[in-house]
Image (spheres, helix red, strand yellow):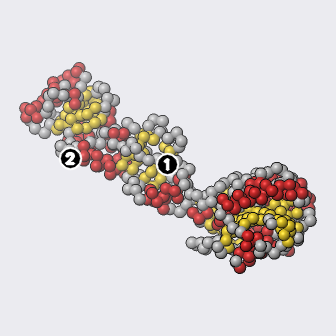
Amino acid sequence: MKNRVPETIIVGHRNPDTDSIAAAYALGELKKAQQVPNVQPVCIGLAGERTEYLFKRFGVPLPPTRNDVYPRINSIMNTRAPFVRKGNSLFDAIGILENNQTSRLPVIDEQHKFCGMLSLFSLLGSLLHTATDSGLTGRKVRSTLRLINDVLQGETLSLSREDEEQFFEVYVAAMGADSFKEHIPRDNPESLAIIVGDRTDILLMAVNLRARLMIVTGSREVDDVVLAAARERGLSIIKTPFDSASVVRRLKLCCPVELMMQKEAETFLPEECLYEIKNQLLARHEDIFPVVNTDNRLIGSFSKLDMEKEGFCQLILVDHNEYDQSIEGVEEVPVIEVIDHHRLRMPPTQTPIRITCDIVGSTCTLITERFLNERVEITPSTAGILLGGIITDTLLLRSPTTTPRDGAAVRYLQEIAGVSAETLMTEIFQVGSLIAKSNSPAEIINADRKSFTEGKYTFAVAQVEEVAFEQFYGAEEGLLAEMQRALEAEKLDFFGLLVTNVVCEDSLLLAVGRRVILNSLAYRKIHDNLFDLPDILSRKKQLLPQLLKIMSEL
């Protein structure tokens, strides 16, 4: 995790047009050529049919679809986080906790499924609570002979039923044989675990009592008579190098981890958004949280400290800069760069960022100039994608937003792409009209839509390009109804659909909204909701300034 390179996501605006998607793709190619690691252009929503044609025409895949960049658990979790398996001892678990400098440890079974959490603090509390007779040196220990032998680093001189879990009552033979015999209970010898040194008399007494376990400290030798009697009666003897005090301490940690774990521990899925759970988790006393998949298999963990670190995602915005036009979650991750040709309306940034915002007709023109300025070769396929972005956004350099720089970029790119701008434009617009393709009214008005706020007013303007108005007139009633529905559902003050005839180079505006705004439109009214906009081709440069002026004055 420490060496993980943040993912740099390049994204255009919502309801992306060809210029937006083409710019994101081409900038990604530029960054990759410059050896920038972990770069991914993406598309918010589905690309339009004409954009799909352009990418297919030049043999490159469309950027993948992504709807948000909210930081998720999988961006911060540690997939190599420590864990302990059921059946292991508390002694093993504490070693793992210590070696990894952590206070909580997931417990898993043989299938790697999550079983619970083991906490260092709750473990200490449990040990203190359960050993009420004499604190941490209380007599009762629940374990198996196999675990006891492992924790004591023992040598098994005689062993039976080593995997049988039971309670042991521990007694230290620190007195004479007669006194010790009176000290230990005789009603349940199957629970007795006697700690003894080189005391043959005590060992023989324990054998005669049929004690379950004898632990010989200091690696002392055991008399053959004792061994023979123990083996004959199926009793167990473990020889350990530790002294009696160390054995007592270690025995308390022979308990299987599942007996001390928190079984109802909350788990998280890797796809969960951090912003939804961050405040809740920061207020809790736990500091390590397990991550599982849908089969409840442990795949990692994360900590409170991980939630406070920088995310593993950063954004480059192309063809927009206003956050309400951008991908969901843009406020949660750092924006490191903007390349745009619209008005600046982005929020202040925490640190300086690179901004290229200039007066050109297409963002793809700015990307082309970036290739040239940074002396990176443009491949024919990338040149074709950039060319398509420019000619669709400037309507083959006929839009009033067109600048000489757009024309220079087109001339440069068509030579590399091996196709003229006129030919490519004809191919793209022959793909078909959004309206003629029987798309639903909702699909049409959302295909290339942008939202704006000016003063107290919130409004949206969509645009479709057609080769004639006939298809629009046939769909007008349904479009108007869908726009009215969106207006009410989203509490907008105005919704306009600019229908542009790329052959005649003029437009119609279908509009719904507050009557005071509709009455302020300085265009010839065809009927209450339809306006004639001769010589209007650009939403950004010709229609939007008029709408912003109206909103501002109102």
Q: Point out residue 8 in the picture as x, y percentages from the top left corner.
A: 64, 60
Residue most extreme to the left: 178
First-in-chain label (2 vs 1): 2
In the displayed structure image, the side of residue 92 where residue 375 appears, left or right = right
Q: Is residue 256 visible?
A: yes
In front: label 2 or label 1: 1
Give the residue pinned by disc 2.
135
Q: Quadrant of the C terminus?
A: bottom right
Place residue 220 in its image quadrant: top left
Answer whether labels 2 and 1 touch (C-beta < 8 Å). no
Identity of the residue drawn at 88% across and 70% down? 534
Give the residue pinned by disc 1.
268
SS type, badge 2 = helix
Residue most extreme to the top: 232
Place residue 519 in its image quadrant: bottom right
Residue most extreme to the bottom: 553
Mark 2 and mark 1: Cα distance apart in space: 36 Å
Foreground pick, 228 / 344: 344
In the displayed structure image, the side of residue 246 where residue 478 appears, left or right = right
Identity of the residue drawn at 76% across and 63% down? 462
Foreground pick, 226 / 384: 384
**Callout 2: 10 Å neighbours few (<14), some, many (20+)?**
few
